[in-house]
Image (cartoon, rainbow, N blue to C red):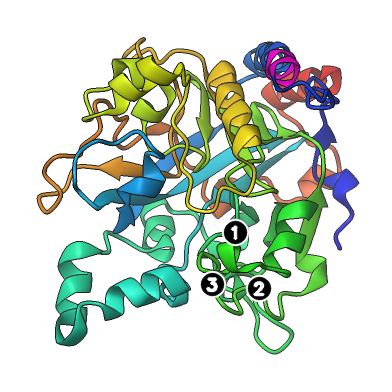
Amino acid sequence: MADSRAHYQTTRELARARDSQSPQVRLTEVRKGGLRLREKLLSMDNVVYYRTCDLIRVPYPTKYGLLNAYSMPTPFMHILNRLFIVQFRAGQSIRTLLFSPSDIYGNRLTPYFHRLAKSFGPFENLGSKFIAPVIATVEEWLEKTGISPEQVDYISYDHLHTQDLKKWLGTGEKPGFFPNAKLLVTTQEWRSAQSLLPPQADWYCPGGLDGVPENKIIFFDDDIILGEGLALVRTPGHTEGNHSLVARTPEGLLVSSENGVSADSYSPLQSRIPGVRSFAKKTGMEVILNGNTLEKGLDQYISMVLEKTLAGPSSRNPDYYNVVPSSEMSSFWAFPFIRPTFSFGPLEFGRPVPLHDLPSRSSRINGSKSKTRKASTKKAARV
C-alpha cells in the first residue's frame, strides 16, 4: 500500500458526527459538520481544471433509481455514466484525478447488466447499440483534452459497483494504461468488494479487482483533502464504503456520487417526475435514494443530506443543489414518461494542463515556484 501521508490531508469537521445512537442526532450533527467543511473548502482556490465527460447511457430499473417514489409503470430509466477529469494544485505540483473512469467494455460482465443484454436474445448487439449507446471512452476523452495517461496521478470511484480496474492499474503480469496512477478508495469499500454477499454481488464486476498491485492502492478512512479546492468525503449508504467527490469551481462546490441519480433526488418537492413530489410530501423525505443494494439505508439518507449541504443551491437554478451525480438520469425516447426536471449537462471550468506545460520534476525539487504557487502553498498549509 502506498504511503498516504504524501497524498492527502485528513480533515475532521465530520469526525464522530455519526456516533450517536439517535438517527435524528446523527442527521443534525452531519448537517453541522457539513456546513463547517463547506466553509473550509469555499475558502480555498478553485481547482485548476474540471470537466464532466459522457461515457455511456444504460437502462437502470426505476424501482432502484427513485426508490419507492415513482408512480408510472415504466420499468426502466436511462442513466448517463460520466467521467470527471479534475486537475488541482497540491503544494508545488499540479495533479490529475480521474473520478469514475469506467472501462465500459470490461464492465459489461457485471452480472445484472450482462443478464439484461442477454435478454435481447438474437438482437443483443442491436439492443446494446440503441439501448446502451457508447458516447466516448475514457481514452478518447483524455486525447480530446490533451492529458496523457502518464499524467494521471489518481483514479477514484464513489463506490466500486460494475468496475473492472485491471485495464487502468494493471496486474502483476500486465502494466496498466495509467502507469503512474494510484487508486484512492475507502478501506471499507475495498474489503466489501472482496467479500460479497448475494445482494451485493449482482452489481460488482467478477474479477474486476483481481491482481491489482497493492502498491497501486491508497486507502483512506476519514474525509480527506487532496489539494487546493478538492476533497473526498465519506458518504456511506449506497454502499458501506461510499464516498463523494467535492470540487471548488467558479460555480461553487460541485458534489458527485451515485447516492442519488438526479437533481430531483435532492430536491424532490420541486420535481415534476410522476410520483416524486407527492411521495416526498406524504412521507417528509428530504431526498430520494438510489437503492439497488440498500446496504445502509439510513446512512444513505444522511449522506445525501450531507451532499446537498456541502453543495449548496445551484446558481443555474436555486431550486436545486450543486450535486452532479456520477450516473445521472437522462431523457430517452424508449422511456417517455421519465425525465429529469433539471440537469446540469456538460460542465467544463478552466483549461487542461497538458504534460509539456507542467514544471519538470527537477525544477519542483529545486524549489522553483511562481508567486501563484507560493500563495497556494501557504493557503494549503492553513487547512
Q: Is residue 186 found left or right of 356 in the rendered image?
A: right
Residue 278 located left or right of residue 81: left
Q: Residue furthest front?
A: 282
Q: In the rendered image, which quarter is residue 166 located in?
A: bottom right
- 360 relative to 147 in the view: left or right: right
Residue 282 in view, yes or no = yes
Q: Considering the numbered disc 1 on the image, is that residue within a helix, a strand or a loop?
A: loop
Question: Badge 2 is on which residue?
Answer: 209
Dominant secondary-structure state across the stretch colored magenta: helix
Spatial separation of the CA atoms under disc 2 and disc 1:
9 Å
Q: Nearer the viewer, residue 287 or 325?
A: 287
Residue 205 has which mark? 3
Which residue is located at x 27 percent, y 59 percent?
A: 135
**Mark 3 and mark 1: span between their CA atoms?**
9 Å
Say what amino acid the circle numbered 2 marks: Leu
Residue located beneath label 1 in the image: 160
